[in-house]
Amino acid sequence: MHPRLSCSAATAIVVAARAASCGQVAVVVVDPHAPPGEAVVSTLEQAVAWVALHKEDAEQFEIRLTPGLHEVRHTVRFPPDLPPLRIEGSGARLVGGVVIATPDWVDPADPAILARLPDPSGVRALVLPPEALAGWSGGLSGPVHRGMGHGVSAVRTEFFVAGHALTPARWPDQGFAPVAGILDPGSTPRNAGDDIPESERVHEPPRGGTFLLGDADRAARWAGALAAGADLWAEGYWWWDWADEQIPIASIDAATGAVTLALPHTYGLRDTARFYVTNLPEELDAPGEYWIDPGAGVVYAWLPEGAAHAEAALSMLDGPMLECTGGRGVTIDGPTFEYGRGGAIVATGVDGLEIRGCTFRNLGAQAVRLDGKGSAIRRCLFEEVGGGGVALSGGDRATLTHADNTVEDCAFRRCGRVLRTYNPAISLSGVGQRVAHNEIADLPHIAIMFGGNEHMIEANHIHHVVQETGDAGAIYCGRDWTIHGTVIRGNLFHDIAGSDARYQNAVYLDDMASGLTVEGNLFIRCNWGMLVGGGRDNTIRNNAFVSCGMAIHYDARGVGWMAKSIADPATSTLHKNLAAVPIDHEPWKSRYPMLATYLTDRFGRPVGGVFEGNALINTPLGNIDDRECVRVIGNITLTPDVASAEADALIAAVGDGVTEFDLGEAVPGFPPIAVGRAGPSSR
């Protein structure tokens, strides 16, 4: 069989690739079930090699994936010198794990395992054929050390039924348990950081902390399992509400219920910690839980109702499915990426990469990491992703050259499923990225996090995020005076609940973040609309806050609790970031001249802040600590509430392209907010 070469829109002829006289588009088909031919191969990896071999024989190439399953057992790497290439994968599923269409569930038979199960009657077993587990990069893996400050590229092997991740056997079955007390906080690696004054740094040998479980029966049962060789782990928010970490358990005292961790937590342990313990069959006691015996190759699961005949899968691949370095003009159109322990796509130094109409689900770590220019991710769905959705970078900060990369018309749902903090739906760095018309919902922590300069974050629909953590924002940045130029406008934020004690915010400009504009956004039912942590030259204008706990908290931490940490240029992160960019040279000197005054003009105060022309509807203004430096002018407070039905009607109109939030005669001159443009278009 020969590749198909299109000489015109109306004519297609079939010739050998090496004899392609018209040389426009060569097609190679990937079909795992067809006999191989000259332009028919079994795997995507073989197809990429085919294109590399024939790259001189056509101007453009297409890899056509047949509908159905395509196993990706090793990362497929794209050579940087490939010609323009399109991967067409509508209906294709690229899977990084073992998929069993009709699993053969049996009753557990191993007496040693049966003795460990609290209720064997609810548990079924799935024996995995050795040949199905062989040949994967990574393969079966137990829990890994992970959490805030401990980034990983792949998580443990997960088990999926009917397209949903089951829960590794754990206690408690949901949520977290409070510690009953702290016997030893352990060592505190954070206290040795290079941003701590040398005289105050504490260098100590690593020592895991010890806490009390408060459940004698469980302590005894777990101690016995640990003594018999079980691999027990504890996941928790051990000190701060935003710093989770999964740590192996070293020992359990059956008599006292003291649990000692094998590694220290970054900040140590304190008595407000919340945790759960996982990876032990002794707690396989609820529908939707499982435990894998890696030595025997058996999955034990308490199946959800009606799931006995559903597709089952185990994630295996420990790297990205696709890796592109330095390529130009690659388009990935339509496939679904799922069931990998790692992510889907890593692209570095690419030019004009287009990812469109793809689905990313049930992955373990970051779904897409894209560094380059002129690239775009459009009309994609990210759901049930273990880590973040998209990490976008590119451009040059020294010259403020824009990357012009885009994430647009995408939906992000339930990302951060495993890696709970600092794994946002979208993260931005570099210069000149654009994030527009996306929906982001159901996240434990941040929706969009950014650093760098001159990004545009507009017309996104963000709701039900920051649900598990505190001191965070739906859109977040922090600890950098130099991140000027980003604009956050025309976004709809709603139902971001929380409490004043936990500092959940829709937009959070943390720790002196400066030079940012937040305008024309609509905030509905948010705990705090905004928290600005003392930064300079931040402009907040023409936003509407409806039924929020408060509109804004704009503090002066640079001359308050943070003053000590920014006093010494040798240790201050802010000073180091300022020194890292050429503020005395063009284009910085002309574009951001105010940066030259940050160390001399009212150091540490929120100079140049503006809160202007905002509408506060059934929402108190909040706190602005330094009104000499922050101009507060032209804001309107309306005491009557906008009816819940009216607010919900605005939310329901997202994507219609028409509906506006318009205060009309109530606030003459207030610019309407185009609610209908937020989120992916429904037109």
Image (cartoon, helix red, strand yellow):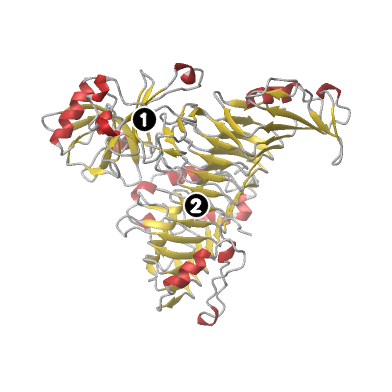
375 left or right of 501 in image: right
Q: Marks 2 and 1, Cα distance to the nearest angstrom?
A: 27 Å
Q: Amino acid at mark 1?
A: His
Residue on which disc 1 sits: 145
Give the percent coordinates (x, y) of residue 222: 20, 29
154 left or right of 467 in image: right
Locate residue 79: give its quadrant. top right
Residue placed at 49% from the left, 46% from the top? Answer: 425
Give the percent coordinates (x, y) of residue 149: 39, 36
Front residue (pair 630, 404): 404
166 left or right of 248 in image: right
Residue on which disc 2 sits: 440
Q: Is residue 399 above or below residue 290?
A: below
Front residue (pair 498, 644): 644
Give the percent coordinates (x, y) of residue 326: 66, 31
Look at the image and tell me whether residue 632 can be seen: no
Q: Amino acid at mark 2?
A: Ile
